[in-house]
Image: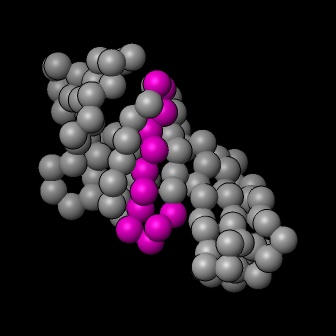
Amino acid sequence: MKFAEKNETLYFIITGDIIYTWNGVEVLPFSDELRNIKEFSIADSYLYVLHKDSSISVWHTAKKKKLFKLFLFNDYSWIVTVYNGQYYTSGQGSSYLNIFKK
């Protein structure tokens, strides 16, 4: 459970891996897109989430929008996916892109 003073909202997980918010009036899920949560933290207007697959996502709390998701690999390569579907990689990170194909 985390309390964000900036927007006076409590963030918590009841069951499973969905983050809920309580603003003193109602309990709502933070985002239907946000799943597979291992741990989370709040700082200023941002929600930082460590996922069970070891990826990290950063969300804007007021807009409830994902800013980016970071994937780190054992060889120190990385991939960052951003809100509009674009991605950025380190030199070797592009070799992992086949993991994300559907």
Q: Residue at x 17, y 19 (%)?
A: 24
**Residue 85 image point, x, y percent:** 69, 55
Instruction: For the C terminus, give its image quadrant.
Output: bottom right
Residue reaching furthest right? 91
Residue 102 sits above or below residue 52 on the image: below
In depth, the one of 19 and 25 nearer the eye is 19
Residue 63 sits above or below residue 76 on the image: above
Region of the chain picked out in magenta, as a range: 44-55
For residue 45: magenta? yes
Q: Is residue 27 left or right of residue 8?
A: left
Residue 101 visible here:
no
Residue 31 sits above or below residue 36 on the image: above
Residue 6 visible here:
yes
Residue 90, picture quadrant:
bottom right
**Residue 46 image point, x, y percent:** 48, 33
Q: Is residue 102 left or right of residue 48?
A: right
**Residue 23 image point, x, y percent:** 23, 22
Residue 92 sits above or below residue 29 on the image: below
Q: Which residue is drawn at 53% across and 44% down?
A: 58
Instruction: For the N terminus, give its image quadrant.
Output: top left
In depth, the one of 96 and 75 nearer the eye is 75
**Residue 66 image point, x, y percent:** 54, 44
Residue 81, picture quadrant:
bottom right
Please count the marks in the image. 0
Here the colouring is one colour
For residue 102: magenta? no
Q: Residue at x 67, y 50 (%)?
A: 82
Q: Which residue is drawn at 39% across and 17% down?
A: 6
Residue 11, picture quadrant:
top left
